[in-house]
Amino acid sequence: MLSPLQKFGKILNNYIDSILGFIILIAFLLRVIPLFFPLPPIVSDAHEYYLLAQNLLEGNGFSLSGNPTAYRMPGYPFLLAGIMALSHSPIAIYIFQALCETLTCVFLFFIGKNVFSKKIGLVASAFWATFPVSIFQTHFLLTESCYTTLLTGSMAILFSSHRLKPFPLILLGTLCGYASLIKPHTIGLIVVIFIYIIKKEKEYKTIMLQCGVIMIVTLSILSPWIIRNWIVFEKIMLTTNGGVNFWIGNNPQATGSYYEENSLEKYSTELEKNKKGYQLGWEFINSQSPKHILELTIKKCAYLFSSESPLAIQRHHVPPKKRYAAVYAHTPLFELIGINIHYVSFMLMGTAGIIILVHNKTNFSFFLSLFIGFWIIVHLIYFGASRFHYPILPFFILTSSYFLLSKEKLIQIKQKLFFGLCVIFLVGIWMIEILTVICFSS
């Protein structure tokens, strides 16, 4: 006799194409319908991206306050400028981002289908389509929606059986290259892809072909930006904000997350701030005890996997002088619960799925371990924030779907012990966050 899950799986197999089409439609509608209601204010990073796009349209080049800049990567502002050239309404940008998030559903389906089964791919796609965090994220003028689509698109090609053909390889390099123009540490993820290809493929020529094409296409996309920076700043580089972010995460007042740190303002140019940020950050690390650095590292990791509550809070205009905890405490409870209940569930189930996959020692689990490990390490070097875990959430949703539909469960003591430690860490982060808000808002 079939179990309820097996019956559900049988139904899915019979109507895969129809269900996927319905999921895509629902995903897009869920992200477009909220556009008829009040949207989050365009402030902070979003405002800067908007100004960069405006300057591009007005013929002022990639600049802020009349000065050329490399503080922000150009990928997202150029996208915004292209959309704004057709329509100056932010609604057009949000519709584009709704399309991006809908595409992520499609890419998740193909990753799940190629790595596991059509059923798992379909369930992962449905989870993302109705994921409140993804729906909310669509309406912020930030890089996360576009970047996550590029990332999942790259992975869909990487795990496709057609990867060895010329067009998919060129497309993979194109997606990786443009993703690097949005977030420069994507270059590290390209190295992870190379390691995966080296492990998976047996023939030397096949390895060289794949890695070579990806590298050439990626570099061809990055090279105009690198050349521009060399001409403008007389330095070969991708961005000038690395040193500032490194100093924010590694200084005597560092909290583990972002905060206003103005000690670099006395340096007049971006290059000076970038260089001094790295220098001062390293001096701070070398002057601290291993215990203090470990504590700071744990805080960074805690902020990286903190709750999605900031996303709900930022939908409302936060007065500049009002304490964050006070705004948090006055945000409607149903919004906080609604945006977090899915996130918490997917993080816990996804972690269980990853542990099972790692135990099975598959090529996908090898890649996933490297990918998530690299993502965490990058933010332990700089600083953590809940927004930064967004690009890896599709993969936690994918492994959640695997955990729910696979017959394999956590059976070994080592698996259960490691999962227990992960649960304690994650739940501990979320509980401390709640208690902190209660204490500071009372």
Image (cartoon, rainbow, N blue to C red):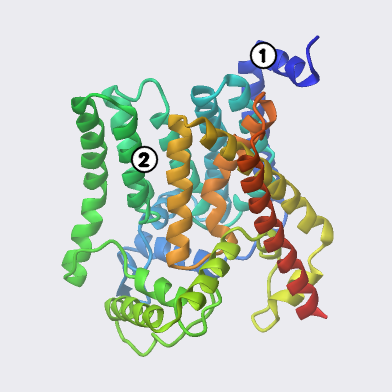
Question: Looking at the picture, how far across and down is residue 338, in whole percent?
Answer: 77, 51
Percent coordinates x, y for residue 223 in the rendering = 21, 52
Confirm whether residue 141 shows in the render: no
Residue type beneath disc 1: Tyr
Left-right relation of 140 to 169 = right
Question: In front: 73, or 421?
Answer: 421
> What is the residue that sits farthest to the bottom in this orientation?
266
Q: In the image, 134: left or right of 437? A: left
User: Which label belongs to residue 175?
Assistant: 2
Quarter placement of the N terminus:
top right
The spot of residue 165 in percent (x, y) is 29, 22
Q: Secondary structure at mark 1?
A: loop
Q: Is residue 330 above or below residue 75?
A: below
Which residue is rendered at x = 52% and y = 41% of the image? Answer: 100
Q: Amino acid at mark 2?
A: Leu
Compare marks 1 and 2 and give the one earlier in the sequence. 1
Q: Crowding at label 2, few (<14), some or many (≥20) Cα neighbours within 10 Å?
A: many
Around disc 1, counting alpha carbons within 10 Å, would you say few (fewer than 14), some (14 to 19), or many (20 or more)? few
User: What residue sits 22% from the left and 58% below the top?
Assistant: 226
Q: Which residue is under mark 1?
A: 15
| Rendered position, 2 above or below 414 | above
Q: Is residue 19 above or below residue 285?
A: above
> Mark 1 to mark 2: distance in Å?
31 Å
| 211 or 226, nearer to the observer | 211
- Position of residue 91 in the picture relative to residue 71 (left or right): right
Which residue is at 30% across, 23% downward? Answer: 164
